[in-house]
Amino acid sequence: MKEPKRYIANARELLSKSTIEDSRYTDEKYVKSACGVAYLGVLKAIELHLQTKHGLTRKELPRKVEEYRKALQKYVSVHNGKLLRAFDDLYDELHIAGYYRGLLHHSGVLKEILKRSNQFIDKLK
C-alpha cells in the first residue's frame, strides 16, 4: 500500500503550501487539491485491495462511488462493516466538503481527516 500512502503524503505537502491564520488554511486552492489527492489515495487503496486480495482485474474495478460502496460491501464489509462507514465519511469529507464544495478550512479538521485516511488505508492491507 505504498502508492496510496504516497497520495496522502502528497496531500499533506499541498496543504503545507498554504499559510495558516487563526488555525485556518488561507488558500482554498491548496486545500481543495489536497482533499482531492487524498480521496484518490483512498480509492487507490480500495482498488489495490480488490486486485491483490480478491483477484479483480483492472477492467472489473469500480468506476463510480456507488460501485466502490458495493465492492466494499461484497468483499470487505462482510468481515468489517466499519470500513464502509469509514469510506462514506471520507467520501463526504474529502470529496464533497473538501474538494467539491471547498468547505474545509480548519487545520485541525484537515489533519484529522488525513490521519483517518491513513488508518483506512492501513485497514485494507
Image (tube, rainbow, N blue to C red):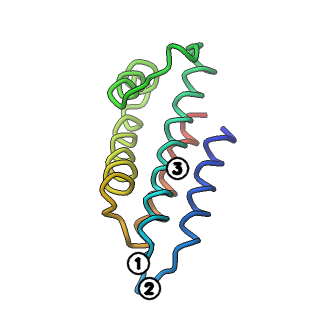
The amino acid type found where label 1 is placed reads Arg
Would you name the residue on which mark 2 appears? 21
Cβ–Cβ under 8 Å for marks 2 and 1: yes
Q: Quadrant of the N terminus?
A: top right
- Farthest right residue? 2
Identity of the residue drawn at 55% across and 50% down: 118
Secondary structure at badge 3 equals: helix
Camera-side residue: 2 or 84? 2
Indicate the quadrant where residue 110 lies: bottom left
Would you name the residue on which mark 1 appears? 24
The earlier-in-sequence mark between 1 and 3 is 1
Would you name the residue on which mark 3 appears? 37
| Vertical position of residue 110 compared to residue 107: above or below | above
Secondary structure at badge 2 equals: strand
The amino acid type found where label 2 is placed reads Glu
Q: Which mark is residue 117?
A: none
Tell me: 93 left or right of 55. Answer: left
Identity of the residue drawn at 69% across and 41% down: 2
The earlier-in-sequence mark between 2 and 3 is 2
Identity of the residue drawn at 32% across and 27% down: 66
